[in-house]
Image (spheres, grey):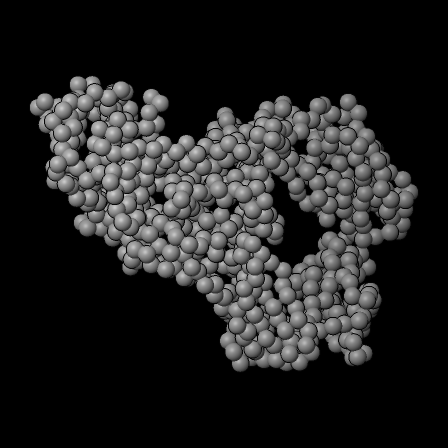
Amino acid sequence: MHLNNFFSGRKLGFLLVMALFFMCWNTAPAAEAVGITLEIDGKRVVTDPAPLIINDRTLVPVRVVSEKLGAQVEWREESRTVHIVKGNRSVLLRIDNRLVDYKEGETAYSLCDVPPQILNSRTFVPLRLVSNALGVAVSWDGTSRTVSIDSGITSELTPFFQVFLLNIKPGQVVSSAMELQVGFGDVPPEGSAEVRFQLLDPDTGKGPVIARGSNINGKYTWLPELSDRGPRVLAAGIYDTRGRFLAGHVIPVEMAVVPRVVLTGVANDQTVTGAVSLGAYLNFVAEYVKYEITNQTSGKTFITDEADPQGAYNWSPEMTDNGTAAIRAIAYDASGQAYYSPAVTVKVDVARRLELRGVSAGSVVEKPVTLWPFRNFPVTQVEYLLIAPQTGKEEVLATTGYAGHTWFPGPEKAGTWQLAVRVKDTVGKTYTSDPVYVTVPAAPRLLLQAVGPNQVLTGEVKLKSLSNVALSKIQYMLINPKTGAKKVIAGGSAADSEYSWTPQSTDSGSWNIQAVGSMASGGTVLSEAVPVKVYLGKIYQAQPIIEKSQFLDFVSGLAVESQAVTGMSAALQAAQAILETGWGQSTPVDKYTGLLSNNLFGIKGQGPAGSVISNTWEEYNGTTFRVDANFRAYKNPAQSWADHKSLLLNGSRYESFRAVMNNSTLGAWALKRAGYATDSKYALKLIDLIKRYDLKRLDETGI
């Protein structure tokens, strides 16, 4: 896969014995340094190509200058690095990366103010970087516009920016989670808006952002990945509001995390009498956690499904759990390795609970309700009871093994009633819930179940109704909402049956559909008149935004570019786009015109290019159906990408997500907690995509 590399800038220079040379005029990002003379040890040197000025820094062809100073220069194509050696001193430069390795005995790391880059087919570096690497002095004569290098004068390498990683020492062993913070010799650089911490691989000079935030002086918790082991370079950078680097510092560290898992939410010897929220303290990034609950009285063990490592798991013990229980949290890393917390032993002592669910006290039963028993003990039989409040007389509505019961009372039950549930446990004892008072109206009811309000009918329709009275006949009427004119479109004597209606071209337009029932006792009962639209023209389906084989490269470029500005994990961004669009093959279009929305994340409303009409799901009388909805339209996919990031970066509900959005795993779970999607497996699906297609490499950036 071809991936674009985007790197945020960092500004770190060196104070030498002579003043740093700055140009006296504004220049374009890359311009030839016309009229600048380069002298090395008193001799004028003509380079081809000539020196360049980029962002007020003079860049020179590295090979020419280094070799003139007696150094050897080696270009390594595979790693895109330059290795400069002079005597026992050497420096390793990385193209488009500010990380520099210096070696004179031991290896030291620093950052250059302008990253080495290839221009005019030559590798250019800041002249100051070459002089510092080889320990020579540089001076600038503004009158003659001459840069002079004197190899006979030794210069010291001193960081230009006074930025420091606090509370951590070079070579420190990182064995657990830790707090990261930066300090300044004076004040933060002007325009400072964000601090980012990165963990770089010394071999590649790349690595992920491990913590970030807008509080420049704040402390940030770093949860390491267990896959990060061995030598690393810890970097801190200060950035402006556009994600441009202002200052930074790097320190070598040794990664050797010792995994630690601690169960939270309960304590040893605690008595549990009801629901408790279990959690886990972790000193590393886990993909998910499970909770193991062992009843030491019965010997039975229960293990939960995958749960949010940073969230809470609500455990509601049943009476069968009474006794002594040992609970452990189990955390799983990216390789599937499990790590267990010490067991916490509790005494479970919950009282028997039985409640009728499905209706609330004081409700009016005008539609079907599904009754079901909530209980915390095993049962073998369930009876649903209707009780007359005045006499206490009981009527059994239904008897089941263990199932719900749908109740739709007719007008013969008009009045106030009590509902209750009676159950039989495994030893034959019966228990009855407290009653719930409800009111049943006297009017007969007929509910149209086949279509819903504002549904668009594009072909054959299945019509069905439900009534709380016996019907001898059912008819379905098509009603003109303007004139009130009616016509029968389906029906028959089998009132409970399903009937079909196929609209004709003359039926196109807006209508109301109403069911009319003839009651066996005489008279009629009407359903609500449901507004619908008949459309028999061409319906356009969701369209691919790009060929599936090209989608990963396509979204990877957008994700990496966005990450450089926002700090949001590129891996997570790409995974969301894959999941939301089915690899780019299901992008909303206007169902009536075919206009492509370029909407990669299914966001509703009005966009920069207006909106398109597509489908969304609604429910009416227990039936789900599709209705028209407006989805944002964009002039191009990049607009959609930016709008989605704006939603996550500015929406109040995503505040907790923003705190961890640099990490794809933590960010995926934070999106789930924030309610981004109703799918209970949403976070796990994102994490699986990231693992399966190695998307974490998108987060491996230089500095």
Q: Quadrant of the C terminus?
A: top left
Residue 239 visible? The answer is: no
**Farthest front residue?**
87
Residue 578 in the image: x percent, y percent? 57, 38
Asked whether 440 or 96 is in front, the reply is 96
Q: Is residue 580 left or right of residue 640?
A: right
Q: Is residue 540 above or below residue 517?
A: above
Q: Is residue 628 left or right of residue 288?
A: right
Residue 30 visible? The answer is: yes
Q: Is residue 188 above or below residue 534?
A: below
Q: Residue at x 59, y 41 (%)?
A: 579
Q: Residue at x 34, y 33 (%)?
A: 74
Q: Is residue 121 above or below residue 197?
A: above
Residue 582 in the image: x percent, y percent? 62, 37
Q: Is residue 52 left or right of residue 576?
A: left
Residue 209 in the image: x percent, y percent? 40, 47
Residue 586 occupies which quadrant of the picture?
top right
Q: Residue at x 28, y 41 (%)?
A: 90
Question: How many numbered dots are placed on residues in this image?
Answer: 0
**Farthest left residue?**
143
Asked whether 48 or 484 is in front, the reply is 48
Residue 291 in the image: x percent, y percent? 59, 66
Q: Residue at x 18, y 49 (%)?
A: 186
Q: Is residue 311 left or right of residue 81?
A: right
Q: Is residue 221 above or below residue 551?
A: below
